[in-house]
Amino acid sequence: MDNLIKATSKTQDLTYELKIQEVMDVNYQIVNSSMTVSSLREVLRKKRILGVPVVDNDELVGIVSIEDFIKCMEQGKLGETVETMMTKDVKTLFADEPLIHAVMKFEEYGFSRFPVISRDTNKLVGIVTKIDIIKGILKKLETVDQHEEERRYRASHIFQDIIADEISIQLKYYVEGRNFDKAGEASTGLKKTLNRLGFPPEIVRRVTISTYEAEINIVSYTEKGEITAYIDSNQVKMLITDKGPGIADINKAMEPGYSTAPGWVRELGFGAGMGLPNIKKFTDKMTLKSTVGKGTRLETVINLNNYRNENK
Amino acid sequence: MNSLKNIVQDLSLKVVSGDIEREVSGGYSSDLLSDVIANAQKDDIWITLQTHVNIVAVANLKELAGIILVNGRQPEDATLNKAKLENILIMLTELPTFEIVGKLYEMGIHGKKRK
């Protein structure tokens, strides 16, 4: 149980998300306190259970386990009633408590089952065992996975599902200059979208990294700019434009380490003169045009069909 | 692979955001963000003194395992908020970069050799 809960953060989340009522067994067996110990044995045997709550007139009055039964047998008390052998101080859980409470109680008491009580009526509504918890989590994980897959499926088939000779998706992002608090929002938005569309992770990484560098350039040097992604079944083309000061010497700007970044930009860890070289490194094609005083236009292409050869 | 959990425990790092249930494949240390973008590898642990919100974006883009802020530096509020939102692991240490990198190296966290 320990390991299961520690296994993944998703499982951990689920122990907080899921309520006991979602995993508990509602088709549980009960016995009453006047039942004899030998009839109890029949119930446990037939139902293949190791313990059972004791209910009189709709009220939970105790719980008996196979251990209690064995004790009775050793002492030759098979003719006595359940009442004499049951545990009267029953530890219970409320149906609306999160699963983690159950997990904690299992660890605290070492019991193998807990009766579950409704907080409103104070009546027994179910039984929860460690197995119920594991089953409940697994079932939930499965449905979470399914949703994820379905979403991915739908998105990644967009190109096949739409009937047209050519399809392209256009995504546009406006970038605010001089504002490093918002820098990266366009590229992260694009990253999320590409992931949803089901692109290979390597493609997503290359597109977002090159876009991020371009976005940082807009923020560092200009008042505002635009990033547009044109996606079709063959390639992701990015067009990044601004009306900033322009680049005086493009060849020089392409040299790793060359930078004209002002001090405040450098203090934030940018302006290392690697932005444009990085863009070149992560894309298949890069076209940079700039006019001093007018602005800059950067076009990059990442091919989708040969993405496996990315270590070029 | 080293788990972040061991690293956090052994080096007494303070976790301020994100999830330590993850493996680390290597490490990279740099305070230049573009350098990190160019050279850090997926699942690397990144050691830096930068505290600005953009470290979260870089860690996110490069799918880094986590960020260690050195010299007792605290992340800016915006950084912390963003890191929590994006589930990016940020850890703090009082040690300077040289020391923490040395300790990580001793634990078997190595940088990837350049080709």
Image (cartoon, helix red, strand yellow):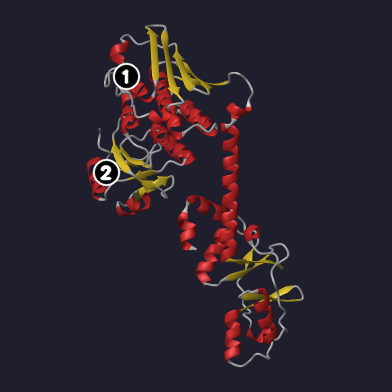
Q: Residues within 10 Å of mark 1 (few under 14, many from 20)?
A: some
Residue pictured at 55% horizontal, 59% vertical: A100
Nearest to the observer: residue A2 or residue B19: A2
- Helix, strand or loop status at disc 2: loop
Q: Read off the chain for label 2.
A: B
Residue on which the image places disc 1: A261
Q: Nearer the viewer, residue A203 or B51?
A: A203
Which residue is drawn at the image coordinates 30% and 36% (left, top)? B49
Of A296 and A236, the residue lying toward us:
A236
Give coordinates of residue B40: x percent, y percent.
32, 35
Q: Residues within 10 Å of mark 2 (few under 14, many from 20)?
A: some
Residue B74's image quarter?
A: top left
**Disc number placed over residue B110 in the picture, else none:** 2
Residue located 61% across and 84% down the image: A69
* The C terminus of chain B lies in quadrant: top left
Residue A218, x across and y down, in percent:
42, 19
Residue A299 appears in the picture as rendered:
yes
Amino acid beneath label 2: His
Q: Nearer the viewer, mark 2 or mark 1?
A: 2
Q: Is residue A96 above or below residue B106?
A: below
Q: In the shown orientation, is residue A77 left or right of residue A279?
A: right
